[in-house]
Image (tube, rainbow, N blue to C red):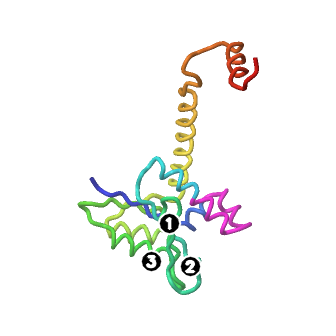
Amino acid sequence: MKTHYTIIDGYNVIGQSEELKAAAKESLEEARKTLLLWLVNYNARQQSELICVFDAYNTSGVESREYFHGIHVIYSKRDETADAVIERLVYDLYDKHITRITVVTSDLSEQHTIFGAGALRISSREFLLELQEEKILLERELMDMNEDKPRLRIPIDEETKQRLEALRRGFK
């Protein structure tokens, strides 16, 4: 079975979402965190290796990495673009026999580069639609689980429930 990697150009996705763009105007940190939370929920159903790359967040000069609820997050080093990090990841991870890599970006030059390296591409807008669809499916599944879950093992009328509750609490 192939390992599936999805590599996301974080700021590219933020720039394609009206909601995230509005959040970024107030706080870039908040927009990043919102995107990462969306990715966590998305990955709950997808079960792939998600890697989200952001341009030079930490300006200390070195690349930094963190693990956010199952999502690998990479901040490029100073003067290195997210595109360069994504290209390096694709070249490092790709093996046609054991991996499948999808890159989420709307950057045209990046698309040509990753195609040449064997990765697939999905535009940021398409990915945002997929995130929305997955959110709806997850909400439906949760509703179905709550509807199907029996509240009591034995169906009883309201009066009996009240009498049993009174006994449980020590009232007669």
Q: CA distance from mark 1 to mark 3?
A: 20 Å
Q: CA distance from mark 2 to mark 1?
A: 17 Å
Numbered marks: total:
3
* Between marks 2 and 3 in the image, the one whose residue lies nearer the viewer: 2
Q: Name the front one of labels 2 and 1.
A: 1
Which residue is label 2 attached to?
A: 56
Q: Where on the picture, by quarter, is residue 60?
A: bottom right
Residue matched to label 3: 84
In contact (CB < 8 Å): disc 1 and disc 3: no
Secondary structure found at label 3: helix
Looking at the rendering, the stretch of residues picked out in magenta corresponds to 17-36
**Residue 49 pos. (x, y %):** 41, 59
Mark earlier in primary sequence (2, 3): 2
Q: Point out the tag, 2 or 1, that comes first from the N-terminus.
A: 2
* In the image, residue 22 above or below residue 131: below
Marked residue nearer the N-terminal end (1 or 3): 1
Q: Which residue is mark 1?
A: 67
Find residue 113 and name its label.
none
- 81 and 168: which one is in front? 168
